[in-house]
Image (cartoon, rainbow, N blue to C red):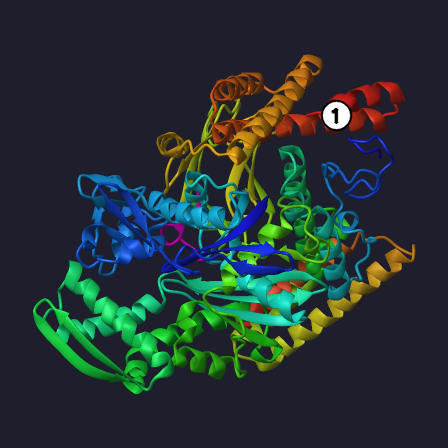
Amino acid sequence: MICWKCHEAVQGPVCASCGALQPPPPKPDYFAVLGLKRSYVLDRATLETAWRAVSRKVHPDRYAGKRALERRMSLQWTAAVNEARRVLRDPESRAWYLATGIPRPPERGAPALDPVFLEEMFELRFEAEAGDPEALERAREIHTTLEAEIARRFAAWSAGEGDLDAVPERLTRLRYLNSMLREHEA
Amino acid sequence: MSNIGIDLGTTNSLVAVVMGDNARCLLDDDEQAITPSAVRYTPEGALVGRPALEGAAEHAATTITSVKRFMGRSLKEAQAAAGELHYALAEGDDAVARIQIGETTVTPVEVSAEILKALKRVAADCLLGQINGAVITVPAYFDDAQRQATRDAGRLAGLEVLRLLNEPTAAAIAYGLQEGSHGKYAVYDLGGGTFDISILELTEGVFQVLSTAGDTHLGGDDFDLLLARQLLEAANQPDASGGVFRRAIEAARAAKETLTDAEVAAIDVDLGGTRVTREVSRADFDALIHSTVDRTLTACAQALKDAQLTLDDVDGVVLVGGSTRVPLVRKVVEDFFQKPPFCDLDPDQVVALGAAMQADLLTGTSELADDLLLLDVVPLSLGLETMGGVVEKLIFRCTPIPSQASETFTTHVDGQTAVDIHVLQGEREMASDCRSLARFKLRGIPAMPAGLPRVKVVFTVDADGILTVTAKEEYTNTEAQIEVQPSYGLEEEEIEQMLEDAIDFAETDVDARMLVEARVEAEQVMSALEKAIRHDAGILLDGELESFTAAIASLKEAMAGNDRRKIADSTYKLDELSAPYAQRRIERDLQIALKGRSADEVAINLNIADKV
């Protein structure tokens, strides 16, 4: 890219030559805006450090005395950076984002759940409602196994040994389990 | 030129500035840093601060105190919050509370502007007139309308409001810089009329607000009121108002202040002909206020929960606000957080000092700015009313600001060209339990079959925590018009009218120089835009040219006069108005560059862009 102000080549949000803030990308990649590489594995500390580093460059406090154009772009940048952090902080929304490009299940066309899994869930729910304490324990175990499976699929994908096609369906299972656990733990 | 920091408090206000390496509060002619937030309207004009309070008992109906409680409030809310007022709220339109002063009325915004003007005079005297902009602090828990009202008061006082800063955050800045601390801190801010608790994390020079909670109607004034009621009952005047009530409050406040250091306070006051003489021990006073102080702990627990922290995670507690001088408050805070609170800085001054530091950061030439950044959060969730009066939250509380969220709307009837939208703020599920911020009507949606239009509405919370809304119909790419009807607060036209009425032509050398600078700036902005339009009319949106032309005309009209504020204001508006167009041009040019058009052509376009 070239800087809109001084026409030098520019990388990242701020021009190294003249210090002008560049327009934010129209559909920002959440990992790219934070200067992170796309990965399911992302610890909180790395994310927060990256977020603070970019915030330092784009935050409105840095552009308080500038013209409306740069103040406006600063607001858009910071909002994008904050949104990226919000989505990437939560492993589930991070997984949705990597697998589908949006940070939550699609409004229409969410993946259908496997009938065998559904049947298992109905049974668990029935037992849990009947007051069986082991039912919730089993639900938690399935939850842990699912999370491990999702992590495994992402690891394989990162290594170039597989795709993420099955991930949305597994994430939908996870959601189902989460809502069931919430209902009964509350 | 200096930027100043202002703590616009319920009971007291202060102004501070960074001089050299230190922030310091500026003193008035009486060598006092504190200006009581009191305004008395007299036939000769408004008195502010101590002069307003002197003889307040005799002029109770025209002496306004604690006006901050009514900022951004409707008449109904103000009536509910009024407690035992010695001045009268005016009946009338519900959208804005007004105060009756003799035959006329004033709004809380105007009263606050008087206080700000007085602080500006103090600063101008100390700094030889060289004031650039101001950072004004607000309780972290202030909602959108209250923030807007504070900003409006700043404008009305002739201040360029650089930023609204949350009070606890300001306090943390003041402390953090001195201590060079790292870790998680709770800022417990009990002022005269409001309580705020914020949890902040300090890392590598970044102050990040993790959570904030509070109560906008809880403060040291409540302690005074509890004791004053006892005194009034002792005088058989439980329903006293006006001067008698004021005297009871004053006696109670004096006793409270005595009890900070002494074990016993003697009260001797004449309440409407009955003399009340008694001794109040600290134990008596503590028993009286205990449940009120305890109410602050609910918010403390909420803030910890929102920050996902336990008490063990908190490295320190900072005390802010004059009411934290009350020994019981210190004890309750220490017991709750299980550690002695910091109180090295004067709790009355700490917010103003932090505001001055933030103001200095915003000058762009500050040496601190390379090391320090402040990341604040939205205090209350923002949402929209959906079917059945349920609120759908779009921006959750404690989200870092600036923040944007969007929602796509469609139509329910064939050919429908408008959609109603109701924006709310608060944590409750039902719209009726949340605070109404604004009602919008999206108009100009192209007539299409039901469900086909896609109107994308973008909600933006800026660094001041103030909300703006824009909308676009995505199917035909037409910008939908929005009619904003703020549920509470003053209309822009009312503010403009007040500005017109309030302008004073205090001509000094500095003013004359700033007038020249304002004209040069205005010329630059105007000619760059006119040039851009000549070259690039093609990407103007419907109605954009008309709005630019109108803004240019009003700028030219301002330039015909000699009021630099009016010129600067009109320049600012034109600059703001044309910024989206300038950004579109840049983005278009970058697109062309990406598509590999000749570099020369791009350079020509870019050349024009950088002038806008």
Q: Is residue B385 visible?
A: no
**Is residue B429 within the magenta segment?**
yes
- Residue at 68 percent across and 30 percent down: it is B583
Q: Position of residue B195 (x, y in %)?
A: 42, 65
Looking at this rendering, what residue extends furthest in the left direction?
A: B273
- Residue at 44 percent across and 35 percent down: it is B440
Q: Position of residue B511 (x, y in %)?
A: 51, 33
Which range is magenta? B422-435
Viewer-proximal residue, B500 or B240?
Answer: B500
Residue type at mark 1: give it: Arg
Q: Position of residue A186 (x, y in %)?
A: 51, 72
Looking at this rendering, what residue extends furthest in the top direction?
A: B534
Image mark 1: chain:
B
Residue A176's image quarter?
Answer: bottom right
**Residue holding disc 1:** B588
Is residue A16 depicted above or below B433 in this figure? above
Is residue B182 depicted above or below B12 in this figure? below
Viewer-proximal residue, B266 or A134?
Answer: B266
